[in-house]
Amino acid sequence: MYFDHSATTQPDERVLRTFMDASASYFANPASLHAEGKRAEKLLERARTQLLGTIGLGLTEGIFTSGGTESNNLAILGYVYANQHKGRHLITTSIEHPSVLNVFQELEKQNFTVDYLSVDEEGRISLDELQAKLQKDTILVSIMHVNNEIGTIQPIEECAKIIHSSSRAMFHSDCVQSFGKFSLTDFTDGPDLVSLSAHKIYGIKNSGFLAFRKNIRLQPLVFGGGQEHKLRSGTVSVPHAAALAKAARLLVEEVDMQQFRHWRNDLVAFFSEIDECKVLAPNASAPYILSVAFAQITGEIAINFLQQQGLIVSTSSACSSKNSDVSHVIEAIQVPQEFEKGVIRISLGKNQTIEEIEQLKVAVRQLVELIRKGVGK
Ligand SMILES: Cc1ncc(COP(=O)(O)O)c(C=O)c1O
């Protein structure tokens, strides 16, 4: 019983079929001038157009990448290096994924100034703080849509309005955890650059996409034959592109957010009744991510126990400057000390069943019994 869809998802069979078919029938190099190359190029461009249509926001450019990490790196480094003559001030949040946070830390070493927006106890940034931090020389703001550890949804439409109305900065959003589930197409304003990853949406690993607005200048990070409009050299994998477009289309068509909401509310109510447990971001998180923290037990012991009952959940990720057992997100939302090492993340998928949710509750009840007997000490 798999409850770790924020870490990765099992590829959808139909996506695998698209990948196999494209690998067999569209193997030609899409940069080749012959007819087979043209056929492959056509499929590649169809995938690009379809993905851009799913993202919306008026973003007309898109580059296929190796995943969310590369998309984030290309968006931030690529934009900052190409536009550093306009200013050297950058803004992000304290709870970004390491593929954003570590890029900004690298830029600080190169004498860029970075402001890290603080978050409240549910991981929400403050729009007032964002407004206050924007300066004349701010060139880029990067704010994730849905946090991968605690699921907090940031108000990226409002962020975009503030950024665009009061600065010249561009707005990048890491939408790896939200894409396909939350639609951006109705937004009246939104990010200028959007990062996606295929393996979070039942697609294939090592595949992602960076969408961006026309006229945005990026500096390439990989040099070579000049593929992908000179922004990412290397022969483009048409099968990966076609499979990503297929995964996106299927998820958008099939995702049942109402079902997620129902299960999540049920699980929030369930965990809230347990004394030894604290629900993180109960009012701010996406309906498919639920993190809870146990007192008197580590996340690792909890996930091992649940695994013995056939349930796969994860701990929050272990990336922290201060304390190797506590992630930077858990530190940022100031989880009380007795809970901070006991975090587990339950992330739901589109094929989850009610039986699995009920099994999870049974196993958690058993875990709580063990905690009461002092097993974590
Ligand atoms: C929010 C977020 N951004 C970026 C990434 C990196 O994506 P990828 O694994 O495709 O490099 C992840 C993956 O865990 C993520 O959750």
Image (cartoon, rainbow, N blue to C red):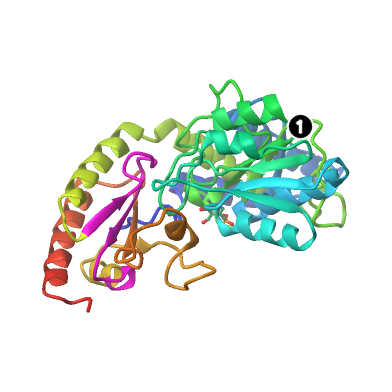
In terms of secondary structure, where does tag 1 sit?
Answer: loop
Please give the name of the residue rendered at 17% of the width and 48% of the height, measured from the top-left corner: 270
Viewer-side residue, 228 vs 377:
377
Q: Is residue 1 above or below residue 230?
A: below
Ligand 1, image quadrant it occupies? bottom right
Asked if one can make out residue 29 in the rendered structure from this viewpoint, the answer is no
In the image, taking residue 249 as reference, residue 172 lies left or right, namely right
Quadrant in the rendering for residue 265:
top left
- Residue 366 percent coordinates (x, y): 13, 65
Quadrant in the rendering for residue 340:
bottom left
In the image, taking residue 192 as reference, residue 349 lies left or right, namely left
Quadrant in the rendering for residue 135:
top right
Please give the name of the residue rendered at 73% of the width and 35% of the height, measured from the top-left corner: 169
Does the magenta portion include 252?
A: no
The residue identified by callout 1 is 168
- Residue 293 percent coordinates (x, y): 30, 59
Please give the name of the residue rendered at 49% of the width and 41% of the height, measured from the top-left corner: 178
- Residue 173 percent coordinates (x, y): 61, 41
Please state, as top left, top right, bottom left or bottom right, where the N terminus lies in the image.
Answer: bottom left
Q: Amino acid at mark 1?
A: Arg
Please state, as top left, top right, bottom left or bottom right, where the C terminus lies in the image.
Answer: bottom left
Q: Is residue 251 above or below residue 233?
A: above
- Residue 222 percent coordinates (x, y): 81, 57
Q: Is residue 313 above or below residue 129?
A: below
Does the magenta portion include 292?
A: yes
